[in-house]
Image (cartoon, helix red, strand yellow):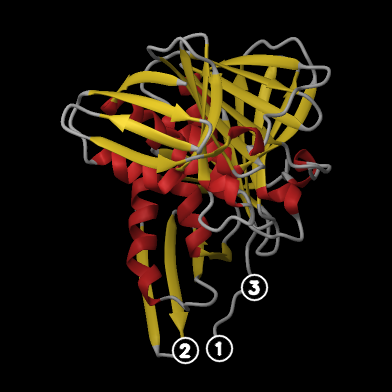
Amino acid sequence: MKFIISSKTLLKNLQLISGVIAPNNALPILENFLFEINEKQLILKSTDLDCTMETVLDVESEDNGTIAIDAKMILEFLKAFPEQPLTFLINTENNTVKVHSEDGEYSFSFFDGNEFPKTPNLDEEKSIKINSQVFLNSITQTIFAAGNDELRPVMSGVFCDVSSGNINFVATDAHKLIKHIVNENIDQKTSFILPKKPLNIIKNNLSDSDEEINISYDKSNAIFSFNDVTIYCRLIDGNYPNYEQVIPKDNPNELIISKSILVNALKKVMPLSNKSTNQVVLDIKGNSLTVMTIDTDVNNSALSNIKTNLKYNGEDLKIAFNGRFLLEILNSLNYEELKIKLKTPAKAVTIEPNKEENQTLALIMPIMISED
């Protein structure tokens, strides 16, 4: 088997799919890239069994076949070459690859490509299409709120709830929750939970162009296709919590505030907060807000007053949050003026942009105020 390809093109595409490979694999074959030649095309694949990524390149070749090449070795090897054509000659009798460049000849071993895991086939396939930038924004708005608890795997991904012409992207770790709504006029009702790893890979590989992403799926797997890249992932099995049920609809106290001013106040007090609880207290009285923290273990305290760029309608209230979680939520919301709705120091709080047509809503659970 023989093929000819640009050194830089091959390197660029192998680097593109290298993020899937896990650092410590139980199966040695997973530390390899699959090279598959088929009808003058080179299909490159990498996998960790739960997630598979592939890209397709045009090459000069009259042959068909598959081999697996050590990923770390081939990446380091290709980095040494300036732009030039490389000729790969595969000898199946002794399992070696010879690479001819403009100034030398190099030889290394390969593995049987048939040992590489097969990509999944979908049963009763369905599909939806979504603009790449809309999808990128939806994932960016939500993925940070997904949990990491292995005992609750359904909360470790992003829930896609498709109904009534909308897609609701939802993520939660039981301390915070984000719901982002996309109007796509999709005439179907379905839902599935996407794991974080393939979503982060997609985030890192989406360009600024407005191409469509095709998402095909069944009960077990999803396939994302965009440009010349295809990502296969195993869906998270299980029933997602009823997120609508936990979002309060009757919080009577409403705080309208500048996001940048609140973020600035939090950044001032957070370095002095308790390192285990990250507690910050919001004390709202009339049209003034005091953001404060105290850490008696090391005799730290901080207090920042906000008396401008806010409007409060409700009863005086003193409530505490994990400041790190609160900052994550505020930084995720792409709007300067925010609406924060509260009820009591023990009830969930909602945060959303203060505008009529709002796509994103955040929820954060308060924590017990500790002053000792």
Characterize the local packing of mark 3: few (<14), some (14-19) or many (20 or more) Cα atoms within 10 angstroms. few
Characterize the local packing of mark 2: few (<14), some (14-19) or many (20 or more) Cα atoms within 10 angstroms. few
| Sequence-first tag of 2 and 1 | 2
Characterize the local packing of mark 1: few (<14), some (14-19) or many (20 or more) Cα atoms within 10 angstroms. few
* Cα–Cα gap, marks 2 and 1: 7 Å
Which element type, helix, strand or loop, lies under badge 3?
loop
Left or right for 112, reference 347: left
**Residue 263 screen position, x and y as percent:** 38, 54
- From the image, tell me which residue sits under label 1: 372
Determine contact: label 2, label 1, CB under 8 Å.
Answer: yes
* Cα–Cα gap, marks 1 and 3: 12 Å
Foreground pick, 282 / 181: 181
Q: Residue 296 carries which label?
A: 2
Amino acid identity at mark 2: Thr
Up/down of 124 relative to 261, above or below:
above
Residue at position x 75%, y 9% in the image: 187
Residue at position x 45%, y 40% in the image: 18
Residue at position x 45%, y 74% in the image: 293
Residue 117 in view in this figure: yes
Amino acid identity at mark 3: Met
Q: Which image quadrant for residue 180?
A: top right
Amino acid identity at mark 1: Asp
- From the image, tell me which residue sits under label 3: 368
| Sequence-first tag of 2 and 3 | 2
Foreground pick, 361 / 342: 361
